Image: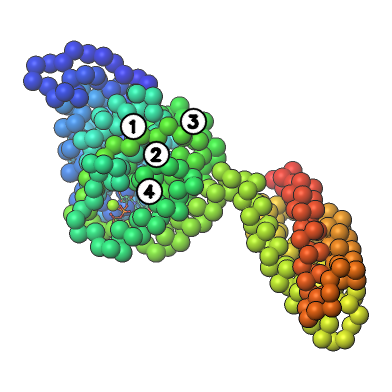
């Protein structure tokens, strides 16, 4: 943490009088924010002078072509610059690119639309200096708030999104686009791959931040320009969550998806078995038919979803491996079902289906272990 002590000047604000913060890089993603750029720069400049801060501001603009470049240049601030991006557009990639091109030890990210008050930046940096790793400008801690005219839908939307992220972090407002952390932690991050809007959540998970602080902010609705938050971004958020869950709970997520696919296999198995039984085939053949068809559907679904990271490998090799690794499970399944049907279960309707169900349960655990650690093990991926 780069904090330089200095003595307070007479009449200075208490926060600014305690310390001078050396080296902030403020990253501001922009798309068509020409009206807001001069306003935010003016407020950051006031902050910079009051606190004698050393900082750079980098606008990461996705080729707005609305005069944003001129707005930054005409501001006359040599600590502000704009980077115009024409590839891999989007808010999250723009922010990540901004961090990559920043050079100061403390990174701040904030929106350009003045929803995020720059005046709390010193407080965020102080919180970092007290040992916390990641500081959010938060609407949902005591003292934080949103504009009064948030309708119920917008409020609910924000709250549900936050709730879905709860297993990933205990932070109250991980959806916030206003946050601060250290360059050193960014440099250590696992491969970043954010989709959509939730950069803070991506960083919290990928950098493994545990010690997260939240500084209350009053979140004001934009006065100039238009919101770029669309339904597409909301859908992308679900995809993003899935990836982050897999990243954080790798084995548990694989197991969970494996069980969901397995559940679909049970339905396929029982349906096939029942149809074959209706056709008058011997019970042993019906049991085997149900097992065989569900084996194929399970393989295809696991390859597509549960272990999708290994989709690049040859399907037939994987299928052979899946059959081989499932063979013990299948044998267990088949023998348990035949045995229960013949020796244990009474002559009731659906006795064969019940026997099949118990056989499946017995065989399933063998299948999971074989798939996870043999067929779809990670070193099958070709780069
Ligand atoms: N570089 C870049 N910036 C973007 C993009 N989309 C949005 N932004 C910027 O990201 C910030 C947040 O976007 P907003 O449209 O304000 O989204 P929001 O704050 O979730 O929504 P509102 O509450 O309606 O303001 C703003 O500074 C935007 O200009 C994009 O695709 N690329
Ligand atoms: Mg906004």
Residue 131: image quadrant is: top left
Residue 280: % across, % down:
88, 86
Question: Which mark identifies residue 175?
Answer: 4
State the CA–CA distance, disc 1 to disc 3: 14 Å
What residue does disc 1 label? 25
Left or right: 98 as drawn, with respect to 68: right
Give the secondary structure at mark 1. Answer: strand
Say which label, 3 or 4, has the lower sequence index: 4
Q: 348 and 40: which one is in front?
A: 348
Mark 3 against mark 2, which lies toward the viewer? 3
Say which label, 4 or 2, has the lower sequence index: 2
Give the secondary structure at mark 3. Answer: helix
Residue 22: % across, % down:
30, 22
Say which label, 1 or 3, has the lower sequence index: 1
Give the secondary structure at mark 4. Answer: loop
Residue 211: % across, % down:
42, 32
What residue does disc 3 label? 187
The reply to whether residue 316 is visible in this rendering is no
Residue 349: image quadrant is: bottom right
């Amino acid at each position: 943490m780069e904090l330089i002590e200095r003595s307070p000047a007479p009449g200075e604000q208490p926060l600014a009088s305690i310390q001078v913060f050396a080296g902030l890089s403020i990253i501001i993603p922009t798309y068509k924010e020409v009206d807001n750029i001069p306003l935010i720069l003016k407020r950051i400049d006031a902050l910079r002078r009051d606190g004698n801060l050393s900082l750079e501001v980098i606008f990461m603009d996705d080729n707005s072509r609305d005069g944003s470049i001129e707005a930054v240049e005409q501001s006359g601030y040599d600590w502000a610059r704009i980077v115009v991006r024409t590839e891999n557009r989007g808010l999250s990639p723009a922010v990540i690119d901004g961090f990559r091109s920043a050079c100061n030890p403390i990174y701040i990210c904030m929106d350009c639309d003045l929803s995020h008050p720059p005046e709390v930046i010193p407080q965020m940096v102080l919180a970092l200096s007290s040992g916390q790793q990641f500081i959010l400008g938060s609407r949902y801690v005591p003292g934080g708030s949103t504009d009064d005219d948030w309708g119920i839908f917008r409020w609910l939307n924000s709250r549900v999104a936050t709730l879905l992220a709860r297993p990933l972090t205990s932070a109250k407002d991980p959806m916030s686009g206003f946050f601060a952390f250290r360059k050193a932690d960014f440099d250590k991050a696992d491969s970043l791959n954010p989709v959509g809007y939730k950069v803070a959540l991506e960083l919290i998970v990928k950098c493994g931040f545990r010690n997260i602080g939240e500084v209350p902010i009053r979140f004001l609705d934009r006065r100039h320009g238009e919101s770029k938050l669309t339904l597409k971004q909301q859908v992308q958020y679900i995809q993003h969550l899935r990836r982050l869950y897999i990243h954080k709970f790798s084995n548990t997520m694989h197991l969970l998806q494996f069980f969901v696919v397995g559940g679909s296999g049970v339905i396929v198995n029982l349906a096939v078995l029942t149809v074959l039984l209706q056709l008058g085939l011997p019970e042993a053949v019906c049991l085997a038919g149900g097992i065989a068809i569900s084996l194929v559907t399970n393989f295809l679904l696991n390859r597509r979803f549960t272990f999708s990271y290994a989709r690049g490998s040859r399907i037939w090799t994987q299928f052979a491996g899946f059959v081989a690794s499932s063979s013990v499970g299948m044998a267990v399944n088949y023998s348990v079902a035949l045995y229960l049907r013949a020796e244990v279960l009474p002559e009731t309707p659906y006795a064969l289906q019940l026997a099949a169900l118990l056989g499946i349960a017995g065989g399933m655990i063998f299948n999971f272990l074989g798939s996870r650690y043999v067929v779809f093990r990670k070193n099958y991926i070709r780069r």
